[in-house]
Image: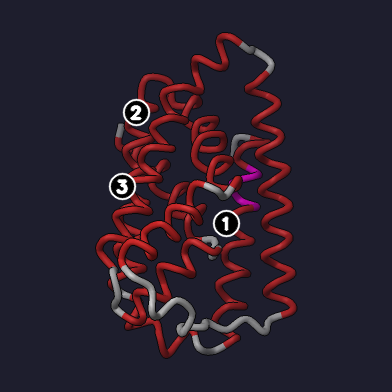
Amino acid sequence: MVTAAISGFYLSFGLILAIGAQNAFVLRNGLRQTYVLPLVLTCAISDAILITLGITSFSVISELLPWAAPVLRYGGAAFLIWYGMRSFLAAWKGGEMLETRDGSGQSLRAAVLTCLALTWLNPHVYLDTVVLIGTISSQYGANRIWFGLGATSASFVFFFMLGFGAKLLAPLFIKPRSWQVLDAGVGLVMWAIAAKLLFGI
């Protein structure tokens, strides 16, 4: 149980770590200290719903469609390899900087709706939570619920750290070099997960 929970935590944390529109939005608002709690809860609860869907429904899909597991497994690995390559290219090119001014005049309602859109309208979110986490959870059999709990807790930990710890990161993320290091780290994580899917290592 503990091993499954820890594995779920690290997998989910690694996937969420990839800076995208959702994380950048939370980070920007965290730097301004505006609507931090509602936004981190919106992200974390959304992830929890999607992860639960993946953990509970993937086994049913596998029973009804036996070919779905290998297709999703190799498809997920291909996506992770591509995503890792994209991260490495971003690290190579550099030039990223954190812009904190966008949306500074938003109301709470507008900020939450924006956050919901960035979460639920992003196809990568479904691949990460429902497909990828759901696929890997099946390897843990009866302990897949613990794997899911670990993955869900990682989402809460990450978004609370991102939102409330943003002020500490402000001096760091105004430097393009920091984004290069982060992108390179994300690439390594993505390729490591792809290797686990393909070779079980």
Disc on res. 53: none
Residue beneath the point at 36% across and 41% down? 48
Q: Where is residue 115 drawn, in percent x and y? A: 43, 59
Q: Which residue is mark 2?
A: 145
Upstream in sequence: badge 3 or badge 2: 2
Q: Is residue 95 magenta?
A: no
Three-letter amino acid code at disc 2?
Ile
Residue beneath the point at 36% across and 25% down? 143
Q: CA distance from mark 1 to mark 3?
A: 19 Å
Upstream in sequence: badge 1 or badge 2: 2
Left or right: where 97 falls relative to 165: right
Q: Is residue 25 above or below residue 153?
A: below
Judged from the image, the secondary structure of the residue bearing numbered disc 1 is helix
Q: Which residue is mark 1?
A: 189
Q: Which residue is mark 3?
A: 153
Judged from the image, the secondary structure of the residue bearing numbered disc 3 is helix
User: Which span is picked out in magenta?
Assistant: 191-195
Kindly indicate the quadrant of the structure image that contains residue 106: bottom left
Q: Where is residue 64 drawn, in percent x and y? A: 58, 9
Q: CA distance from mark 3 to mark 2?
A: 12 Å
Query: Front-most of 34 and 91?
Result: 34
